Image: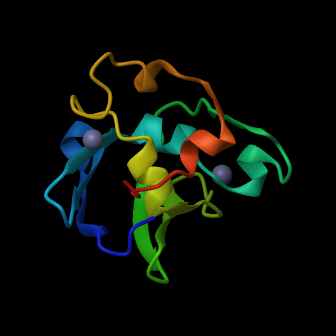
């Protein structure tokens, strides 16, 4: 992931049940809470040695807190006590569902993804 691009602002939009990230290059990602919970990268949700990422269906997840982790990611703390997911910025970038990143709306429908698809990061 490029060191030049990182979240400038992370905002929980409670009324819309959305997590909005404004990136340092001006790009804006708007994730529904279901979606971002679905791709929780932790070992509990994804296993340690899986070759694929599996979407976790969680009904109406509540996001309680967003905590910075180093300079590479953030930890999301969910209402059901699940707090083991450390989302690297390049993972969040790779799952962006905005009209530029995902014009066909395909990402929003994916439920399984090869791991490599979540790691190319921001490098050109
Ligand atoms: Zn998890
Ligand atoms: Zn995007």
Give the residue displayed 44% in from the left and 81% down from the top. 71
Q: Is residue 121 left or right of residue 19?
A: right
Image coords of residue 109 (percent x, y)? 47, 19
**Front residue (pair 15, 57):** 57
Instruction: Specify the farthest residue to the right.
Output: 49
Give the residue displayed 55% in from the left and 37% down from the top. 38
Image coords of residue 13 (percent x, y)? 21, 50
Image coords of residue 40 (percent x, y)? 59, 48
User: In which image quadrant can residue 23 be found?
Assistant: bottom left
Give the residue displayed 42% in from the left and 61% down from the top. 64
Give the residue displayed 60% in from the left and 24% down from the top. 111
**Front residue (pair 56, 21):** 21
Relative to 1, say whether 110 is above or below: above
Is residue 66 something one can see in this rendering? yes
Relative to 124, say whether 117 is above or below: above
Q: Quadrant of the N terminus?
A: bottom left
The total number of labels drawn is 0
Q: Is residue 109 left or right of residue 43?
A: left
Color encoding of the figure: rainbow
Is residue 62 something one can see in this rendering? no
Image coords of residue 90 (percent x, y)? 46, 58
Relative to 113, say whether 74 is above or below: below
Instruction: Specify the farthest residue to the left.
Output: 26
User: In which image quadrant can residue 16 be found?
Assistant: top left
């Amino acid at each position: 992931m490029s060191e030049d691009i990182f979240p400038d602002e992370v905002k929980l939009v409670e009324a819309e049940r959305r997590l909005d990230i404004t990136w340092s290059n001006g790009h804006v990602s708007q994730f529904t809470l279901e979606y971002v919970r679905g791709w929780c990268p932790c070992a509990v949700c994804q296993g340690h040695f899986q070759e694929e990422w599996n979407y976790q269906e969680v009904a109406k997840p509540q996001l309680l807190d967003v905590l910075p982790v180093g300079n590479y990611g953030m930890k999301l703390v969910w209402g059901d006590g699940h707090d083991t997911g450390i989302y690297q910025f390049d993972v969040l970038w790779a799952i962006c569902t905005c009209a530029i990143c995902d014009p066909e709306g395909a990402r929003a429908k994916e439920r399984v993804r090869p791991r490599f698809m979540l790691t190319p990061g921001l490098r050109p």
